[in-house]
Image (tube, rainbow, N blue to C red):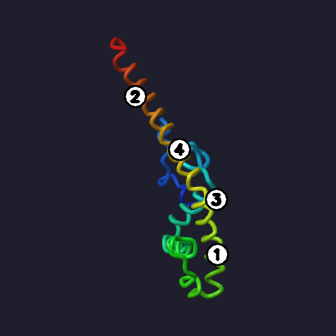
Amino acid sequence: MSLYPHLSQPGERLCNNPDGSVCPTYPCIHVACHDPDWLEDLEELAADQESNKMAWDLYKSMYGKFRSTGPKDKLSAEKWDFFRPKVERCRRIRDKWDQINQDFVAHAEYTRAQYMEEQEKRLRRNIPSLL
């Protein structure tokens, strides 16, 4: 079973294989970032948007510009035990956001280069006398 049961579903994938298939593993080369925290956050967002939003709200209240433990203090110990690892994941994502963003940029550049290469191949097949 995949670590990312929602994201790895064929309908959720953005694989652009020529035959229309999805890659056999996830994450694959078509995923912009392979950071495990980022992927786990996306998986949670797909599975449980409310918990994901709450985790980010707690993170912002505890680590944001205007820090406050108010929202955390309103949670039961059991609820905080549930959200603590999620809030820590949010913190790790923010701490490495520059690298995650660089992954997005590199993936976009790679995707553009692949698209241009495919377009050039199509042109050569369709109009060989012009090239």
Contact check, label 3 and label 4, Cβ < 8 Å: no
* Residue at image coords 41%, 24%: 120
Q: Where is residue 76 in the image (x, y as percent from the top left)?
A: 61, 88
Contact check, label 3 and label 1, Cβ < 8 Å: no
* Residue at image coords 56%, 63%: 41
Q: Mark 3 vs mark 4: which is more N-terminal?
A: 3
Q: Where is residue 87 in the image (x, y as percent from the top left)?
A: 60, 71
Structural distance between the alpha carbons of marks 2 and 3? 35 Å
Structural distance between the alpha carbons of marks 2 and 1? 48 Å
Q: What residue type is labelled 2?
A: Gln
Q: Name the residue under label 1.
A: 84
Q: Residue furthest top?
A: 129
Q: What element carries label 1?
A: helix
Q: Is mark 2 on a helix, strand or loop?
A: helix
Q: What residue type is labelled 4?
A: His
Q: What element carries label 3?
A: loop
Contact check, label 4 and label 2, Cβ < 8 Å: no
Vertical relation: 129 (above or below) 43: above
Q: Mark 3 points at which residue?
A: 3
Name the quarter where the N terminus is drawn.
bottom right
Q: Mark 3 vs mark 1: which is more N-terminal?
A: 3
Q: Mark 2 vs mark 3: which is more N-terminal?
A: 3
Q: Mark 2 points at which residue?
A: 119
- Count residues near mark 3 (Cα–Cα under 10 Å), then give few for <14, some for 14-19, many for 20+: few
